[in-house]
Image (cartoon, helix red, strand yellow):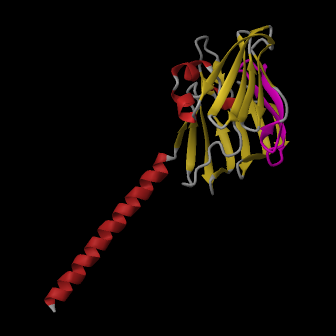
Amino acid sequence: MKTKYYSFLFFIILSCGILNKQEAKTDFEEVDCLTIDNGDGNYLFKDFPNREKDFSGCYIRTEFVDGCVRNGSISNGYKEGRFVTEACCCDNLGNLKRLSKEEYFKHGLRDSVFRQFDKDDKVIYETTFKMGTGLWKEFHSNGETYFEAYTKDGYFTDTLRLHNKEGKVFEKRLYQKEILAYFIDNEWCQRYRYHPNDSIYLEVDSYDAKNLKQGAFRNTFRYKTKEEFDQNYFAKNNLKR
């Protein structure tokens, strides 16, 4: 009888230990999804559907390349509800790196009110999105437009033109859904072709450029796999994502 009692007691203790370990593991997974590191400087205008998709279900803190952050939450694998980008100080001249912003998401798409604030925390732009469709504007810290683009279902519908703090266009990008297809600045131009054949993951044609106009052909970069493209030193430091 005592033997059965001790065996039962040992089983209860062992079960509790297993449950505690499982709970600890779950806690770790939730903490692990709290911070999303966006070292890619393109993040500001690549906020496409599913970009932050995560099925852990928790609050997230997005860290931008300039050190600024955006707070929100993931629900059922998608950005959901209110997201706030904090005003972020400061660059070498003492100016804000990023103005504050309030936006709302539904199933990974911007939906409802979208507000941009100036350095004095006054609204400089307000609009309403409907499931990823609306006019998206971002601003420099001095109030000049960084870009203005209409989106439909969360994707750009036309060429994205980026402006400097003086209001002059310095870069153009064309996306096909979330994939960058064309890039041009005053230094060079890049055309992207994913899976041009069965043996190539990506080909990038490069051209000279001046005054945002495509010039003479330079060369083509080829990458057989995504891993090769992601790990290649030249691609990481020179080609856009």
- State the image coordinates of residue 193 (x, y, percent, origin top left): 71, 29
Is residue 157 shown left or right of residue 16?
right
Q: Farthest residue to the top: give it.
A: 210
Instruction: Say above or below: 131 vs 175.
Output: below
Q: Which residues are magenta?
A: 129-156
Q: Residue at x 62, y 35 (%)?
A: 199
Q: Residue at x 62, y 48 (%)?
A: 53
- State the image coordinates of residue 88 (x, y, percent, origin top left): 61, 26
Q: Residue at x 26, y 73 (%)?
A: 13
User: Which residue is nearer to you in this view: 175 or 125?
Assistant: 175
Asked whether residue 121 appears in the rendered view, the answer is: no
User: Which residue is nearer to you in this view: 212 or 88?
Assistant: 212
- State the image coordinates of residue 192 (x, y, percent, origin top left): 71, 27
* Quadrant where the image shows the C terminus: top right
Instruction: Say above or below: 23 vs 193.
Output: below
Instruction: Say above or below: 63 vs 220.
Output: below
- State the image coordinates of residue 38 (x, y, percent, origin top left): 57, 33
Asked whether residue 162 appears in the rendered view, the answer is: yes
* Quadrant where the image shows the N terminus: bottom left
